[in-house]
Image: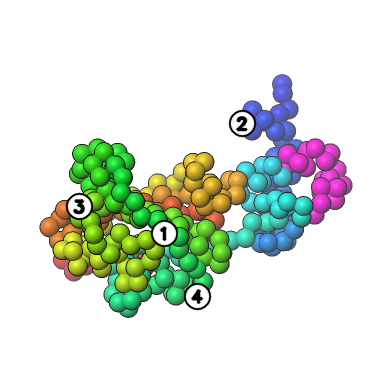
Amino acid sequence: MSTRSSRTGTSPRVQEIATDLRSRIDSGEFAPGEKLPSTRLLSEHYAISAQAIARVIALLKAEGVVEGKQGAGVFVREWQPLVYRPQSEFRRKAPDVDVFHSLLQAEGRDGDQIIEVAVEPAPPEVARRLQLDEGEQVAVRRRTSLVDGIPFSTDDSYVPAHVVEGSEWMTEGSVDRGTNQVLAELGHELVEGLDEIYVRNPRIAEVDRLQLPTGTPIAELITTGHNTDGRPVQVTICLLPGDRHVIVYERRKYAQ
């Protein structure tokens, strides 16, 4: 009978050491951002070969527990999440502060956005939610949000192109009062949002855009915003890396 794990292709001893190192990290013996002992020291501590320790580290990297830094060694992944509150979109806020910067202010963090605007055929998943014919033209604002210099999330909003043609919604760069306010001024105030959350592994283009380390899952939040007539006006697709966000929803019981 094979002594190797049929599930992972690694030996039980490698799995045992990975579990032990994981426990030592969870207990705080190795703190977030701290460098792990060298391969030689780990090999001596666990009385196992350097090649086996390399497999242990590969497992922990794949799980997102540790990360390698070129020429520096292996470090415990740091966890400094930003609290993301989807309901904040409908909260009263200062007229000259958009949702992203309101979020940063609440968390005491420093950040910026890279924003690109285009008109293109609607992707199938967007066309379906906006009740458009597939390929009908939509305007899209692609935002990459950086916090403390690190890409933290993406936030891509789609609306039918004819709704925002010639408006400030199409501005390259930030709109201080927020694009939802622009939609309201155009007669399409967003008063209801349907949120869908999918937790999955990122695609290659998403790994590049968000500079994701190996083993980082993402939460994909797709919000369809409806106006006062109940018509879907905007689809926003947010990608939130699992090591950088906590998604918080508030619920309230209303009187019957």
As drawn, the label of residue 108 is 4
SS under mark 2? loop
Q: Does label 2 or label 4 sit earlier along the sequence? A: 2
Residue at the spot 34% in from the left edge and 68% down from the top edge: 175
Magenta stretch, overall SS = helix
State the separation of the CA atoms marked 4 and 3: 38 Å
Tell which circle, 2 or 3, labels the residue nearer the N-terminal end.
2
CB under 8 Å between discs 4 and 1: no
Residue 182 point in image, percent of width and height: 25, 66
Q: Name the residue type under label 1.
A: Ile
Please indicate whether residue 149 sits to the left or right of residue 114 in the image: right
The residue closer to the viewer here, 196 or 108, is 108
Residue 141 falls left or right of residue 34: left
Residue at image position (68%, 61%) is 33
Its colouring scheme is rainbow
> Which residue occupies the foreground of this view, 218 or 162?
162
Q: State the residue position of label 1.
A: 115
* Separation of marks 2 and 1 at Cα, in angstroms: 43 Å
Give the alpha-carbon distance from disc 4 to disc 1, as whole Å: 22 Å
Q: Mark 2 points at which residue?
A: 7
- Residue found 72% across the figure and 23% down from its top: 2
2 vs 3, front mark: 3
Q: What is the secondary structure assignment of the residue under circle 1?
A: strand
Magenta-drawn segment:
37-56
Q: From the image, tell me which residue sits under label 3.
A: 162
Q: What residue type is labelled 4?
A: Gly
Can residue 201 be seen by looking at this rendering?
Answer: no
Determine the secondary structure under disc 4.
Answer: loop
